Amino acid sequence: SQQGEEDPQALSIQEGENATMNCSYKTSINNLQWYRQNSGRGLVHLILIRSNEREKHSGRLRVTLDTSKKSSSLLITASRAADTASYFCVRSGNTPLVFGKGTRLSVIA
Amino acid sequence: GAGVSQSPSNKVTEKGKDVELRCDPISGHTALYWYRQRLGQGLEFLIYFQGNSAPDKSGLPSDRFSAERTGESVSTLTIQRTQQEDSAVYLCASSLDLGSTDTQYFGPGTRLTVL
């Protein structure tokens, strides 16, 4: 399966705190992408990390990839209420993207 | 330019009726995808189109589901004899090409409710 499994299923933090979400997968990847879905902006691509990269940054987002453990993490620093959303990791290989159930992040102001 | 658009945004129908959902991809994007998302669940891949190649229909849940795409433009997803379990948000996405690095751009979805 190309599906990533996000962990935890739900996460609730205070505004200003950091949020860490994890993703595990079972088979090899070419790259891994993280998407965010909220009611206001729908489903949006956040960041892509290639299999030969170990860490990538984009603004307040930091993504790590450990291909030996077949896992990735997404760190959101200094969280804001607007970060409240569901976050999905998506492995992409030779077939279309397959989404898991995601992590539901709630940032409380 | 404009993003991916979908219509209608909401559709309420009676069990047994047929429905058609429309997707307008970003101009120039050769790959188009349909997904279904039930409440509180992740996205379920349905079908994708890539250029003039035969579509990958492996995700369609039953023969009541079909989709067409005209060239590299509009796509319609048709659900015949709708059932209550078809109630979901149907999302369309397009990407520049069918490749593992290509970002998918999603439309706002069509919320289908089957009574």
Image (cartoon, rainbow, N blue to C red):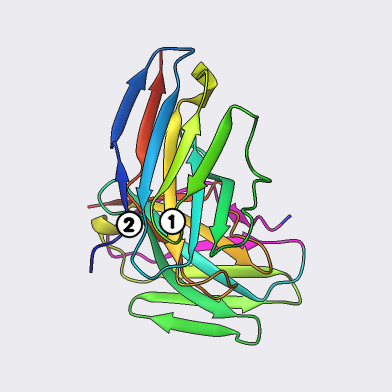
Residue under label 2, please give it.
B4
Residue under label 1, please give it.
B93
User: How many C-alpha atoms fall within 10 Å of the one at disc 1: few (<14), some, or many (≥20)?
Assistant: many
Q: Is residue A13 magenta?
A: yes
Q: Chain of mark 1?
A: B
Q: Residue at x 25, y 49 (%)?
A: A40
- Percent x, y of residue B76: 43, 42
- Percent x, y of residue B109: 36, 43
User: How many C-alpha atoms fall within 10 Å of the one at disc 2: few (<14), some, or many (≥20)?
Assistant: many
Q: Considering the image in quadrants, where does the N terminus of chain A appear?
A: bottom right
Q: Is residue B25 magenta?
A: no
- Percent x, y of residue A33: 53, 69
Q: Amino acid at mark 1?
A: Ala
Q: Is residue A20 visible?
A: no
The local secondary structure at tag 2 comes to: loop
Q: Which residues are the magenta region?
A: A2-26
